[in-house]
Amino acid sequence: GTLGPEALPAILEEKRLLVNRTGVIEFIAGGTHLGEVGGLEGLKSWLVERGKLFQLRESLTTELVPKGVLIMGIPGCGKSLCVKAISSHFHLPLYRVDMIEIFSGRHGKPEGAFVAACRMMEDMAPAVLWFDEIEMGITSTESSGEQGRIFAFFLTWMQEKARGLFVAATANRIDL
């Protein structure tokens, strides 16, 4: 048989439990509305338009479906609030990847932990995937070594990832 809309809360709870066990991905409950975000009118209007396209993702060509957004600014300027508003506006669950935890070494090598987190999130789609403080692990300045490989993987993954994942990345350093 098929599942009806009444099964959605149970499915979301199972997904929440599954990702929270990873130690690097966290389900973020509750959200805020775009109207609660002060200023940023350009970003908000962009999100309204892209939200419409994202909802039609199954019927559109890949090039038209928005893949994500990078929000940069100093700590405390509302980047996290914006990401929560995106999730709410898109009517999708929000999952946060903790880049500091990825690089802590408690979950194996950072490259493996990052790849595993991205792959797992493809199975959780549709969702908004938040890479918090993405500059902690994704930089183009170090092209060799582990960070270079993570950056290369991320670029390829963004191009090929599941249509139902909208990536919202936040960064404090604006000199990326």
Image (cartoon, helix red, strand yellow):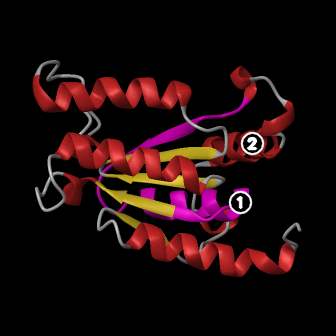
Amino acid type of the residue that numbered disc 1 sits on in the rendered structure:
His
Residue depicted at 43% across the width and 23% down the height = 156
Crowdedness of circle 2 by 10 Å Cα count: few (<14), some, many (20+)?
many
Is 21 rendered above or below residue 144? below
Q: What is the tally of numbered marks visible in this picture?
A: 2
Is 175 rendered above or below residue 30? above
Residue of label 1: 89
Which numbered disc, 1 or 2, marks the residue that appears first in the sequence? 2
Residue of label 2: 54
Give SS at disc 2. Answer: helix
The C terminus is located in which quarter? top left
Residues 137 and 163: in front is 163
Q: Quadrant of residue 101?
A: bottom left
Where's residue 22, x and y in %? 33, 65
Residues 113 and 152: in front is 113
Residues rendered magenta in the picture: 65-94
The N terminus is located in which quarter? bottom right
Residue depicted at 42% across the width and 61% down the height = 96
Q: Which mark is residue 47?
A: none
Residue depicted at 61% across the width and 65% down the height = 93
For the residues labelled 1 and 2, say whether their Cβ atoms are less than 8 Å apart.
no
Where's residue 64, x and y in %? 74, 25
Was residue 73 drawn as part of the magenta stretch in this picture?
yes
Q: What separation in Å lies between label 1 and label 2 (alpha carbons)?
A: 11 Å
